Amino acid sequence: MRSKLFEEKVESVKTASGRWVQLVPDATGGYWLYEPLPERKLGRLLFDQEGHWIYDGDLLDVGEQEDVAAVVTGCRREMDELLKSILG
């Protein structure tokens, strides 16, 4: 159920710097990061078992990395809480 509700959905994030970043979930629980215009790959956002993230790339500055990670971790927290309330 979790993958149908969240992990297959592509998200778009606008960073504080004004850059739009698309987050595309991958099979490992991480995300490929793309800039829609110009079309280019920005790297990946990876997560460990405890939910800590690491940016694998060199095109986003630290603030942009934190903006993207905050959206993902916030969405994951909300989804976990929703699933707990549904499944008991």
Image (cartoon, rainbow, N blue to C red):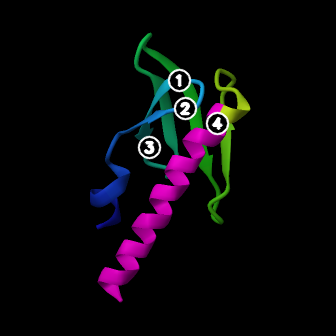
Q: Is residue 86 left or right of residue 81?
A: left
* Local SS, label 4: helix
Which residue is pictured at 58% across the width and 31% down the height?
A: 16
Q: Quickly name the residue at label 3.
A: 26
Q: Quickly name the residue at label 1.
A: 18
Amino acid of disc 1: Gly
Q: Distance between the residues labelled 4 and 3?
A: 18 Å
- Name the one closer to the observer, 14 or 31: 14
Q: In this view, does 75 lie to the left or right of 88?
A: right
- Quadrant of the rendering where the N terminus is positioned: bottom left
**Magenta run includes residue 54:** no
Residue 24 lies, in percent from the top left, at: 41, 38
Which residue is pictured at 44% across the width and 65% down the height?
A: 78
Amino acid of disc 2: Thr
Q: Which mark is drawn over residue 15?
A: 2
Q: Nearer the viewer, mark 4 or mark 2?
A: 2
Q: Earlier in the sequence, mark 4 or mark 3?
A: 3
Q: Which of marks 2 and 3 is in front?
A: 2
Q: Earlier in the sequence, mark 1 or mark 3?
A: 1
Q: What stretch is highlighted in magenta?
A: 64-88
Q: Judge whether 42 appears above or below 69 on screen.
A: above
Q: CB of mark 1 within 8 Å of CB of mark 2?
A: yes
- Name the one closer to the observer, 28 or 77: 77
Residue extending furthest bottom? Answer: 88
Q: How far apart are marks 2 and 3 (CA)?
A: 21 Å
Q: CB of mark 4 within 8 Å of CB of mark 2?
A: no
Residue extending furthest right? Answer: 62
Q: Quickly name the residue at label 4.
A: 65
Q: Residues within 10 Å of mark 3 (few under 14, many from 20)?
A: some
Q: Judge whether 28 appears above or below 59 on screen.
A: below
In which image quadrant can residue 87 be found?
A: bottom left
- Name the one closer to the observer, 80 or 28: 80
